[in-house]
Amino acid sequence: MRNSLRTLLIGWLSVAMMLIGFPAHAGMIGTEQAAASHARAENLATVQNFIAREDVRAQLETWGVESSQATDRVAQLSDAELQQVAMNIDNQPAGGGALVIIGVVFVVLLILELVGVTNIFTSF
């Protein structure tokens, strides 16, 4: 009796799942959308690699910003802001020195200040 009830229940559930079905949605994406997604991924990788550098991380910690906090905020930047920061990093000469690092870190800190994560500039 119990085995037949189990078989009947499995049969009904199988039929119900086949009738309900699970719709799949597929669509075409435009070239612009694919290019924008790729550009954002490249810019994000550029900025995150910069923040992951030991000298930048040390400077951020000197200013009281944890690197994980900076990484989270970089991920939340808009496409235009992310592109601007990535371009600033890419346009710097190789081995640009401490002034370049301070400039880029300042831009990141300014963005963090505007978003409301830190209160570095309000104390001056």
Image: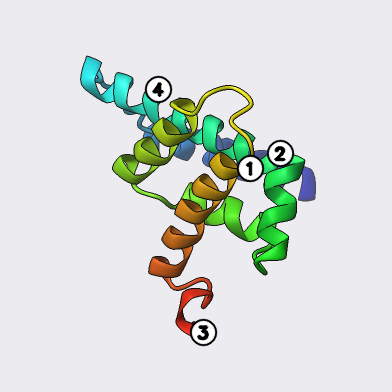
Amino acid type, label 2: Arg
Q: Position of residue 19 (x, y in %)?
A: 38, 34
Labels 1, 2: front one: 1
Cβ atoms at labels 1 and 2 below 8 Å apart: no
Question: Where is mark 3, residue-wise?
Answer: 123
Label 1 CA crowd tier, 10 Å (few <14, some 14–19, many 20+):
few
Q: Position of residue 58 (x, y in %)?
A: 75, 53
Amino acid type, label 4: His
Labels 1, 4: front one: 1
Q: List the single residue furthest toward the bottom.
A: 123
- Front residue of this view, candidates 107 and 83: 107
For the residues labelled 1 and 4, the Cα–Cα distance comes to: 31 Å
Question: Where is mark 4, residue-wise?
Answer: 38
Task: Give the vertical position of 62 relative to 119 (above or below).
Answer: above
Labels 3, 2: front one: 3
Cβ atoms at labels 3 and 4 below 8 Å apart: no
Question: Where is mark 2, residue-wise?
Answer: 53
Task: Give the vertical position of 51 relative to 68 (above or below).
Answer: above
Amino acid type, label 3: Ser
**Callout 3 secondary element:** helix
Question: Where is mark 1, residue-wise?
Answer: 98
For the residues labelled 1 and 2, the Cα–Cα distance comes to: 13 Å
Nearest to N terminus: mark 3 or mark 2 = 2
Answer whether residue 1 is visible to the viewer in this image.
Answer: no
The residue under the point 42% across, 59% down is 111
Nearest to N terminus: mark 3 or mark 4 = 4
**Callout 2 secondary element:** loop
* Res 67 quadrant in image: bottom right
Nearest to N terminus: mark 3 or mark 1 = 1
For the residues labelled 3 and 4, the Cα–Cα distance comes to: 39 Å
Left-right relation of 19 to 71: left
Nearest to N terminus: mark 4 or mark 2 = 4
